[in-house]
Image (cartoon, rainbow, N blue to C red):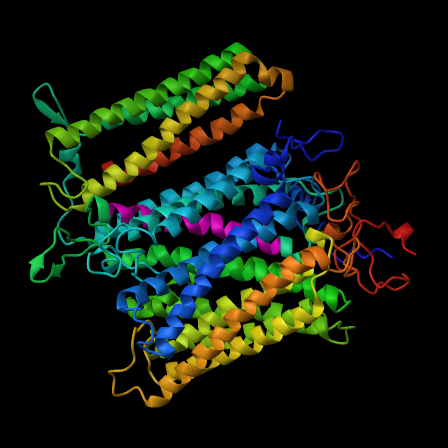
């Protein structure tokens, strides 16, 4: 039944009505849009929380509703939402679902029903997460890393109520959703490609999503285990992570556990998670840069091997997040070494992107702007990563705003730039219409310049030694007034950038009705998702016959061809 | 004008690797198996990491805890005929689970021979082994809880974490066995209905077998780390 749904001549599951077509749909394209909508909605919530934090830092005491407790709750929920419920879900659930079958020439995912379940379980996890805002004493304020013992003790912001339980339960449910989706992505990539589509002819973004999913399937188990054990510590008062603790002069019932163990479990998940987000961003950039520079990607094979190397090394660098946790110094040396080694495959990728641009016919479209912005931002974020990868430099800089600046550059701004580039690039494929270019340019420049104005000063503030996560910087002699002025400046920039994101949403809605008709292949891309019979592609993607692939996905400027690109499904004889 | 820019590996690899290379460089399918079998393998790799994390956490805490770990051969001993026999119950449980792996393997073989009834009976036998295992686990749990007073949050034999890890990990494994029993019953039902005869393909039996063997293999590790250490 499930076997061969993609093979020619075999029927695939047809939707029977409005509900099964648009709500409980098993079509990967609808599921992708559902993922994207929910992720963007919860992402807006995350952005709102970050603006609340910025208001407090820039204009302390302006809003009386933001007290120390709610500030920490905002920090925690902002981090969790952005990393997991926005970026992971959007890149893998959204882009992965939409692009894998279309780019590989399949009719759908390998297991459409499991795919549908994956979205609804993800939706459930978001509901559980959001519900923690409405319980007594609110969501957990333990910091997004949820380190015990503090995260499960009463007295932590939001710690008296069910906030931490809902957080951990939501994570566990998310992991179930991710596993169902992830098994689908991997099986589809391995087992259900078009004729002629070998692994080394796959578009790079499919490689990236494939490897990111693999990272997720191996890394999320550690978080699941950590979450289960933390729930037990809280509910059953086991002492997995809890040492003997005095609180207010009284001994609690805990004893003998290891708080550092949770950090290991968390970061064994947490570091691969960085690459679960970064790899799809790399993939989007690879597609966009080649297409909008009208030139084949430089060093395809090396790009793939670099990705595989990154994915492998990603599992042996986790403890560089824990240098200040009281780790054996020799262990720190090992993890510093592996951390710096991972810069090599990453640099291969950056060089290859830059060389792809060399002597290319660069079209300054909005997606291209995002590519260029990504390259610069990722480079800067990567360079500050070299500081933090070294134990001796990390120890003074850890827990300052330098770290905040670094990871927002490399893990927030960079992926979001790639994400926006991808949205502008594939919007015509989804809707059949182009996004408005002028609005796109305005949105791009405000976002790009604005994020630099936000995060560059944070590096400086960090060098001054201002600790991160502090609710208020007022009472410390070593923090000069200039920091407060800078914080005000950053907050104003953040408000502008936050407001500018509504340009994108406005553009989405307006272009849906008034956008220019895109036609089947507006960017002149070689990959299969633009070669479907219908635009946008219909249920089953390909009509009667599945596409056959004759070439790699980056045949731009092929000598002898009149057009400057040759799609993957065009055989040599038919090139004109 | 072919744009195939890939280096041919065929000349540079020894013969026994050529099949591997051929699989990975093929189009349409990397592995010549049903999709569900590929998916089961990937799931099991992921599940390995769950159990791996559980057991690593257990080992880490057992090595670092401040209070000595309970003497396991004492805690897990059965009182039979006036003496404490260590490892008796767990030896029986392990024997039953391993035997069920044997019947599962026979079921897979007879499935590929298209022996419908024999396959179904062997799968049911396997499920019966699973039920027996879970039943004995219930017995062991209730003995530990009600007779020896071991709780997830503490016990009188030693470190607090003993009960927590024991109930958490064996419980998680028992959950896997229970799900496996349900799964096997569904597969057996489909065998008796003749669904795989109509498809002329018994690979789904092997897919269920993969899961069952995995659960058994995990038990060997849990057995070694909890009862023999």
Quadrant in the picture for the N terminus of chain B: bottom right
Toward which corner of the image does residue A248 lie, by quadrant? bottom left
Q: Position of residue A336 (x, y in %)?
A: 41, 70
Q: Position of residue B155 (x, y in %)?
A: 12, 41
* Residue at image point 62% right, 35% down: A18
Residue A222 is covered by the magenta coloring: yes
Left/right of residue A69 with respect to residue B109 in the rendered view: left
Can residue A111 be seen from the camera position used here?
no
Residue A573 located within the stretch drawn in magenta: no
Picture quadrant where residue A301 is located:
bottom right
Toward the viewer: B16 or A419?
A419
Work out whether residue A295 or residue A152 is closer to the camera in this orientation and state it: A152
The residue nearer to you, when weighing A443 against B57, is A443
**A420 vs A369: above or below:** above
Residue B117 location (% of width, % of height): 52, 10
User: What range of the chain is rendered magenta?
Assistant: A207-233
């Amino acid at each position: 039944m499930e076997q061969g749904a993609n093979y020619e001549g075999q029927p695939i599951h047809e939707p029977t009505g409005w509900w099964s077509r648009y709500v409980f749909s098993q079509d990967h394209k609808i599921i992708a849009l559902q993922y994207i909508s929910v992720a963007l909605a919860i992402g807006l919530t995350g952005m709102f929380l970050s603006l609340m934090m910025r208001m407090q830092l820039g204009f302390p005491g302006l809003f009386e509703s933001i007290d120390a407790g709610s500030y920490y709750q905002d920090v925690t929920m902002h981090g969790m939402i952005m990393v997991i419920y926005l970026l992971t879900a959007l890149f893998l659930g959204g882009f992965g679902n939409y692009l894998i079958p279309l780019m590989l020439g399949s009719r759908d995912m390998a297991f459409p029903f499991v795919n549908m379940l994956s979205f609804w379980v993800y939706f459930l996890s978001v509901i559980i997460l959001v519900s923690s805002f409405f319980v007594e004493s609110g969501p957990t304020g333990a910091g997004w890393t949820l380190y015990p013992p503090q995260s499960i003790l009463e007295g932590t912001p939001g710690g008296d109520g069910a906030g931490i339980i809902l957080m951990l339960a939501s994570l566990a449910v998310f992991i179930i959703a991710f596993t169902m989706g992830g098994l689908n992505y991997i099986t589809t990539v391995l087992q259900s490609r078009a004729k002629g589509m070998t692994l080394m002819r796959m578009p790079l973004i499919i490689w990236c999503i494939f490897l990111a999913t693999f990272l997720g399937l191996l890394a999320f188990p550690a978080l699941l285990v950590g979450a289960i054990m933390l729930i037990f510590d809280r509910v059953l008062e086991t002492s997995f992570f809890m040492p003997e603790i005095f609180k207010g002069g009284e001994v609690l019932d805990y004893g003998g556990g290891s708080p550092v163990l949770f950090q290991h479990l968390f970061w064994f998940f947490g570091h691969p998670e960085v690459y679960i987000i970064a790899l799809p961003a790399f993939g989007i950039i690879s597609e966009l840069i080649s297409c909008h520079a009208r030139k084949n990607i430089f060093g395809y094979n090396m790009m793939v091997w670099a990705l595989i190397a990154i994915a492998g090394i990603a599992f042996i660098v986790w403890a560089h997040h824990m240098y200040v946790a009281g780790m054996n110094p020799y262990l720190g040396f090992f993890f510093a070494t592996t951390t710096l080694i991972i810069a090599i495959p990453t640099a291969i990728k950056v060089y290859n992107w830059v060389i792809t641009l060399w002597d290319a016919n660069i079209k300054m479209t909005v997606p291209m702007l995002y590519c260029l912005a990504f390259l610069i931002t990722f480079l800067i974020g990567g360079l500050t990563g070299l500081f933090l990868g070294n134990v001796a430099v990390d120890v003074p800089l850890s827990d300052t705003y330098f770290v905040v600046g670094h990871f927002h550059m490399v893990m927030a701004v960079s992926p979001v730039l790639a994400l926006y580039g991808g949205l502008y690039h594939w919007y015509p494929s989804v809707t059949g219409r182009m996004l408005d270019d002028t609005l796109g340019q305005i949105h791009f420049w405000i976002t790009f310049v604005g994020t630099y104005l936000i995060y560059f000063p944070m590096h400086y503030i960090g060098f001054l030694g201002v600790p991160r996560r502090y609710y208020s910087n007022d009472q410390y002699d070593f923090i000069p007034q200039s920091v407060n002025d800078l914080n005000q400046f950053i907050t104003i920039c953040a408000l502008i950038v936050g407001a500018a994101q509504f340009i994108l949403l406005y553009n989405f809605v307006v272009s849906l009705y008034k956008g220019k008709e895109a036609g089947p292949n507006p960017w002149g891309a070689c990959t299969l998702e633009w070669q479907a019979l219908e635009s946008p592609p219909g249920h089953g993607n390909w009509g009667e016959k599945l596409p056959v692939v004759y070439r790699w996905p980056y045949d731009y400027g092929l000598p002898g061809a009149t057009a400057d690109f040759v799609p993957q499904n065009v055989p040599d004889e038919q090139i004109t | 004008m072919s744009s195939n820019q890939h280096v041919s590996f065929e000349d540079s690899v020894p013969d026994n690797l050529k099949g591997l290379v051929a699989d990975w460089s093929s189009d349409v399918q990397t592995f010549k198996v049903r999709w569900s079998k590929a998916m089961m393998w990937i799931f099991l790799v992921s599940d390995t990491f769950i159990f791996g994390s559980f057991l690593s956490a257990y080992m880490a805490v057992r090595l670092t805890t401040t209070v000595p770990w309970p003497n396991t051969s004492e805690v897990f001993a059965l009182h039979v005929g006036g003496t404490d026999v260590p490892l008796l119950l767990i030896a029986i449980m392990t024997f039953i689970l391993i035997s069920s792996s044997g019947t599962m393997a026979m079921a897979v073989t007879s499935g590929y021979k298209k022996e419908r009834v024999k396959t179904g009976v062997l799968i049911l036998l396997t499920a019966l082994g699973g039920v027996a295992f879970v039943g004995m686990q219930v017995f062991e749990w209730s003995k530990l809880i009600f007779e020896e007073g071991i709780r997830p949050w503490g016990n009188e034999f030693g470190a607090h974490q003993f009960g927590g890890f024991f109930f958490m990990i064996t419980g998680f494994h028992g959950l896997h066995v229970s799900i496996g029993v349900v799964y096997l019953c569904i597969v057996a039902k489909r065998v008796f209905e003749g669904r795989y005869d109509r498809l002329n393909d018994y690979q789904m039996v092997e897919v269920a077998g993969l899961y069952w063997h995995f659960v058994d293999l995990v038990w060997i590790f849990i057995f070694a780390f909890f009862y023999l250490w």
